[in-house]
Image: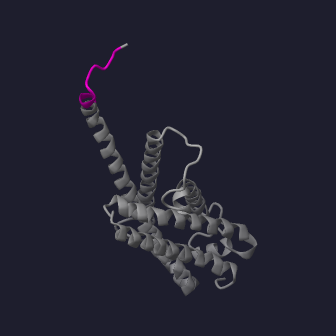
Amino acid sequence: MAVDTRTPKVAAAAATPARTSKRTSSVLLKILMAGTGILLVLFLFAHMIGNLKIFFGEETFDHYGHWLRTIGSPALPDEWFLWIQRGGLTLAIVAHIVAATILARRARAARPVRYAHRPKVQAGYAARTMRWGGVIVLLFIVYHILDLTTLTLNPNAESGKPYANIVADFAPGRWYVTLFYAISIIAVGLHLRHGIWSAARTLGQQTARGQRIGQGIALLLSLVLVVGYLAVPFAVLTGLVD
């Protein structure tokens, strides 16, 4: 059995490059998470604004849906921009999940001992449920695509008629769809609240005042997002949009 005869200082110096490399890698992963998260948040808000056009009536909303399919025309065939966008968002989501998984495993490896009682530190409910919130969000994305993009699960399923498809989707008799949608959007809001705050820290915001401002902005943006997305299904459910 080989014995390390180096002094502690020499051994520590030899291990430093590996630790430095891993620390650099973790920083890059956090930056990747922050960057992809910002991209996804921008898309969520743009999508929310588009959804709210439903309150301007069927003709306006259907025209908006047609416009989305023709972005880039005539340089791009119909719907190509949407598929390019979906491909980019998919890559961003995969990168976000992979980075989060690697960082979570490294955090667990750094604390191999399980304590009988682990005090509740840092964040609160949103921080403690990031993992399950992420799973719910991912399942919701898959369902949402099958429901209102490919129309596989939509009860109306009429291409070119997004207004009618949404009204049919959230009809009072399908309250369970609205319930699932609401739970998923709230999970998105919780995920977003903690994610924005974490991204601000990753990108260099470390002061106490800056953290308070970041937390306030994160809470405000998540509330706006949740209310904006839930406005449509509940408007259909209550008959405000029919």
Q: Quadrant of residue 174?
A: bottom right
In the image, farthest residue toward the right: 173
Give the vertical position of 213 relative to 97 (above or below): below
**Residue 9 lies in the magenta-colored region:** yes
| Quadrant including the N terminus | top left
Camera-side residue of 207 and 128: 207
Q: Which residue is at a point 44% across and 66% down the rendered structure image?
A: 41
Q: Relative to residue 133, is residue 73 drawn left or right?
A: left
Give the vertical position of 25 relative to 126 (above or below): above
- Image x and y of residue 112, in percent: 49, 38
Give the vertical position of 217 relative to 9 (above or below): below
- Image x and y of residue 133, in percent: 56, 58
Q: Quadrant of residue 92?
A: bottom left
**Residue 20 lies in the magenta-colored region:** no
Q: Relative to residue 55, is residue 202 drawn left or right?
A: left
Camera-side residue of 195 and 111: 111
Q: Which residue is at a point 44% across and 73% down the rendered structure image?
A: 216
- Image x and y of residue 115, in percent: 55, 43
Magenta span:
2-11
Q: Which residue is at a point 35% across and 71% down the rendered structure image?
A: 209
- Image x and y of residue 119, in percent: 54, 53
Principal SS element in the magenta part?
A: loop
Q: From this viewpoint, is residue 162 visible?
A: yes
Camera-side residue of 236 and 158: 236
